[in-house]
Amino acid sequence: MRIEADTKLDFKDVLIRPKRSTLASRRDVDIARNFTFRHSGAAFAGVPLIAANMDGVGTFAMARAFAEDGNGLTVALHKHYPLDALIAFWDAEPAAAAQVWYSIGLAEEDEDKLQAFLAARPGAVTRLCLDVANGYAEPFVEAVRRLKEGLARDMTLMAGNVVTGEMVEELTLAGVDVVKVGIGPGSVCTTRTMTGVGYPQLSAIIECADAAHGLKGLICADGGCAVPGDVAKAFGAGADFVMLGGMLAGHDQAEEPVVDGEIVFHGMSSTRAMDRHKGGVAEYRASEGKAVRVPRRGDVAATLQDILGGLRSACTYVGAQRLKELSKRTTFICVGQQVNDAFTGREG
């Protein structure tokens, strides 16, 4: 047993300090990014926000809405769509399909479905998301290497989740273009409560971004953003992409039934999700997610305008004309007595 005494921070623990700026208007801010992925060599141009691969968020309808938005936003489709539905979507809506990440887990049936899809539509998948709860398990790293040597050889690969620099480095060197960062910060995730495992998300982003960028890799901050200001903080901390779940839940694009004017939003390790997709919670495990009712929020377009507008505004407060400059212009100030006491060595 050992204890790390360094203070670790979450989004709620900090604010971004304003700085003098020459920007006259939010419209002067460019929040798009241009990347060339290290391993695939593919290019990305657009606003680097990704809808999470949750079955109430990463939907075909969300992909259509993001494509219509025109800002280059992308969607990580949830992995539970049947093969025929995926083929039909790719055939009927090529513009929306071009904006998605095809998602899989470690289950053999996920890889089999991907192989069958590629056999039916060769070259259709250009972006692949390998998503697991525990990115520290050896089978996960082995799956990354196997995919990069086989099915995903020419694809841009996003994979995770992890929260420490050494695993970001290992995954980047193993072939991952974008490492997903976050264990337990999501609004419907109970991993921290059930297991005691996790890492404050802001510090995880800072440390993992430093590790990835040293190897010309990228990270995606996954989880913990509850308001547009958290998205700005994630980019200010060094995230290249930010993945959103709860902020996009409850919209018309959720493809979930409406009950008494509300939509049920659940974590993908919740009892509700496992009842729906796995036939129940296996006897050897516990639920690590919860289900909550969220008000029906209408079309996602208004929420996207709030998020993107808040991000532009954050850039004007620190003088960042481009999103790329935000992390260089960001100074975080700690708020809250507990955090301040930790830094000054005082005890309450």
Image: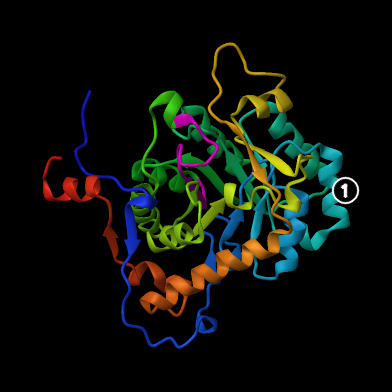
Specify start and end residues of the magenta stretch as a single range: 175-191
In which quadrant will I find the N terminus? Answer: top left
Q: Is 184 within the magenta?
A: yes
Image quadrant assignment for residue 206? bottom left
Residue that carries the numbered disc 1 in the rendered image: 88
- Say which of 307 and 80 sits in front: 307
Q: Main structural element of the magenta stretch: helix, strand or loop?
A: loop
Q: Using residue 98 as the reference point, say whether residue 37 is left or right of it.
A: left
**Residue 82 visible in this rendered orientation of the protein:** yes
Q: Using residue 166 as the reference point, say whether residue 29 is left or right of it.
A: right
Q: Give x and y (percent) for residue 346.
A: 11, 44
Q: Is residue 60 above or below residue 275?
A: below
- The residue positioned farthest toward the top in the image shown: 283
Q: Give x and y (percent) for residue 318.
A: 36, 75
The kind of residue tagged 1 is: Ala
Q: Using residue 14 as the reference point, say whether residue 290 is left or right of it.
A: right
| Local SS, label 1 | helix
Q: Residues within 10 Å of mark 1 (few under 14, many from 20)?
A: few
Q: Residue at x 61, y 30 (%)?
A: 106
